[in-house]
């Protein structure tokens, strides 16, 4: 059957047009690099997405720290992952790259801080 | 008020300002200072927690704060003086900058070169003349993003988004992930404003409808927003009677365009281009006032930060030459946006070295042929599989193909 979708790997957004049997790619056009084929193959078998969000920080100079997953998770797990992120509380300081939740929901990826938050005292009362 | 003398003052500590400062230091310019209004440098990237930044520059997908950190870290390593919580209020044509700082009070600085890197601001409800009452709950996408991602304030439960630029799309997903319901994204144009990948991963993934050729014709509610009335528009963008549809919602997000922040440029007497909203610049990114330079979103609104960094670095190399020689090579050859092209930068070139043109097409073209002509003859043509107004095109132009000083015209079909 014919399948068409936009590749989301990079901002180029190649329009992939292919012939598939629902599971495997039989032919493919429109991909300007090999990642297009990989993406479509993954999308057919097991669509995955990375998630970015924020986590509550206690005692920090800002109330939130931005986070992301170390690898994409199955699309149908997005809201379960969001719930786990929402429940999490961390204490300042938080450093960039710090693992805040290892092996999140046993999905094989970690939740990582993408920013640093200093403890509140560092700046004194404001 | 003491006068602080510098080789170069950089106004704005976002990606453009930081990249310029770092490259200036690397080029041996020591006496510089970056002025930043916020408590932390990093610019708009601090609130852009989604990933997709840096794919061109670092070949990996970073979140906004991570991308900004790569530059901030370097700026700290290089000991670049960063005056945070300091707002520049005025830039004079003689390159004096008046600023006000939380820590130092009034400041008067003068430099041999000034770099403008103030970024852009959002168009508001007033700017697009949306009718209706004035309830709470109508806010611009960037403000919503800052509330949710920086200040931990959720803005509503049921939302409609007007405008399908990338920020609106990103916010549609963000609101959905945070438990709000996004009923629709309305776009007045017949095509989406944002990148196709964002349509797919921010709207399609969550089943959020994109209604093209639609706008808001009424805002209803007292105190808090209660509903909006959407309508289809005709080819002249006038609402089609009878097509109205009410959406009950407590939040209306506006993602209706960005405007380069050029109030300071005007105080310096810099000439602006009405099409970009930014300064008129030559290939050195020098404005109409010698010694004042401009790059990043203050010059023209970018879709990818990678090119903001690149543009600022090119600018910095010119500033270093300017500081060394006191002037730059003149740029007598004009570049004009012809049919199908909404704008092209820089406005003038020297014709003696390779420059990279930045341009946008007026309408989606598939395929697309970009042609550069001079005195009736074609000097360059490049074919693209597709071109969208949302995607800036970069086109290298070699010096050898430019003949004499007659203007160049860039067209797209
Ligand atoms: C919501 C959103 C989503 C985006 N998504 C992506 C994406 O997915 N991928 C991507 O590559 N790009 C993305 N971008 C684009 C990218 O973030 C911008 O192109 C980039 O941040 C522009 O950098 P800049 O330095 O020109 O401006 P800014 O980041 O706006 O920085 C300007 C700085 O100047 C300071 N300033 C302004 N006026 C003054 C003054 N008078 N005195 C002192 N300081 C001042 C401001 O405080 C600010 O820190 C996105 C942008 C937005 C808004």
Image: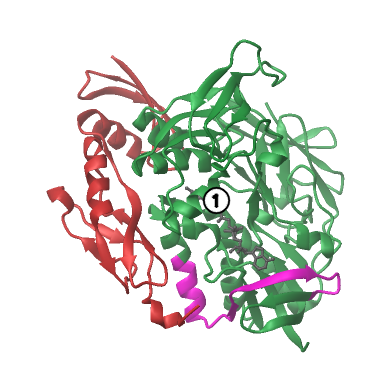
Residue, far top? B242
Determine the image quadrant of residue B69: bottom left
Q: Quadrant of the N terminus of chain A?
A: top left
**Count of numbered circles in the view:** 1
> For residue B82: magenta?
yes
**Of B315 and B71, which appears nearest the observer?**
B71
Chain A on-screen colour: red
Chain depicted in green: B
Residue B21, horizontal then vertical, whole percent: 60, 72
Rendering coords of residue A79 (x, y %): 26, 40
Give x and y (percent) for residue B353: 71, 57
> Is residue A41 something one can see in this rendering?
yes
Residue stretch rendered in magenta on the structure: B69-96
Compared with residue A97, is residue B213 higher up or lower down, i.e. above or below? Answer: above
Q: Which residue is mark 1?
A: B143
The residue nearer to you, when weighing A22 against B116, is: B116
Q: Reply above or below: B148 against B180.
A: below
User: Which type of secondary structure does the marked residue at label 1 adopt?
Assistant: helix
Q: Quadrant of residue B188?
A: top right
Question: Which residue occupies 22% across, 35% down?
Answer: A76
Closer to the camera, B58 or B272?
Answer: B272
Instruction: Say which residue appears at 57% left-offset and 28% top-offset.
Output: B187
Residue extending farthest to the front is B222
């Amino acid at each position: 059957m014919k399948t068409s979708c936009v590749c989301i790997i990079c901002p180029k957004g190649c329009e992939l047009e292919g012939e598939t049997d629902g599971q495997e790619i039989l032919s493919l056009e429109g991909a300007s690099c090999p990642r297009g084929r990989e993406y479509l193959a993954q999308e057919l078998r097991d669509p995955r997405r990375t998630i970015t969000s924020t986590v509550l920080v206690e005692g920090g100079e800002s109330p939130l720290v931005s986070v992301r997953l170390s690898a994409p998770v199955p699309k149908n797990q997005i809201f379960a992952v969001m719930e786990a992120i929402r429940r999490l509380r961390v204490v300042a300081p938080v450093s960039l790259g710090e693992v805040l939740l290892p092996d999140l929901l046993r999905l094989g990826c970690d939740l990582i801080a993408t920013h640093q938050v200093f403890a509140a005292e560092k700046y004194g009362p404001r | 008020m003491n006068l602080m003398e510098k080789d170069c003052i950089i106004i704005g500590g976002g990606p453009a300002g930081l990249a310029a400062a770092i490259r200036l230091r690397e080029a041996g310019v020591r006496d510089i200072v970056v002025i930043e209004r916020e408590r932390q440098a990093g610019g708009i990237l601090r609130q852009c927690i989604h990933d997709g930044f840096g794919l061109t520059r670092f070949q990996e997908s970073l979140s906004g704060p991570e991308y900004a950190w790569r530059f901030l870290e370097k700026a700290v390593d290089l000991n670049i003086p960063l005056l945070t919580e300091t707002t520049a209020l005025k830039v004079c044509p003689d390159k004096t900058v008046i600023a006000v700082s939380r820590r130092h009070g009034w400041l008067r600085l003068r430099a041999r070169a000034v770099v403008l890197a103030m970024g852009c601001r959002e168009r508001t409800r007033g700017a697009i003349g949306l009718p209706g009452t004035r309830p709470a709950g109508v806010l611009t996408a960037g403000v919503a993003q800052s509330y949710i991602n920086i200040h931990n304030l959720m803005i509503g439960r049921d939302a409609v988004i007007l405008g399908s630029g990338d920020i609106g799309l990103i916010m549609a997903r963000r609101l959905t992930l945070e438990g709000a319901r996004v009923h629709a994204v309305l776009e007045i144009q017949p095509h989406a404003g944002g990148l196709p990948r964002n349509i797919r991963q921010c709207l399609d993934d969550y089943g959020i409808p994109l209604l093209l050729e639609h706008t808001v014709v009424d805002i209803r509610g007292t105190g808090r927003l209660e509903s909006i009335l959407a309508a289809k528009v005709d080819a002249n963008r006038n609402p089609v009677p009878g097509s109205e549809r009410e959406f009950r919602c407590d939040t209306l997000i506006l993602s209706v365009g960005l405007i380069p922040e050029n109030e300071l440029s005007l105080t310096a007497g810099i000439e602006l281009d009405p099409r970009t909203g930014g300064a008129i610049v030559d290939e050195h990114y020098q404005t109409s006032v010698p010694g004042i330079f401009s790059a990043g979103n203050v010059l023209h609104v970018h879709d990818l930060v990678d090119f903001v960094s690149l543009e600022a670095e090119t600018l910095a190399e010119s500033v270093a030459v300017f500081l060394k020689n006191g002037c730059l090579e003149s740029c007598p050859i004009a570049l004009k946006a012809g049919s199908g092209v909404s704008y092209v930068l820089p406005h003038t070139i020297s014709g003696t070295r390779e420059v990279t043109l930045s341009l946008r097409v007026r309408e989606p073209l598939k395929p697309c042929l970009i042609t550069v002509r001079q005195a009736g003859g074609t000097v360059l043509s490049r074919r693209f599989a597709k071109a969208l107004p949302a995607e800036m095109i970069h086109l290298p132009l070699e010096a050898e193909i430019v003949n004499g000083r007659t203007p160049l015209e860039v067209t797209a079909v």
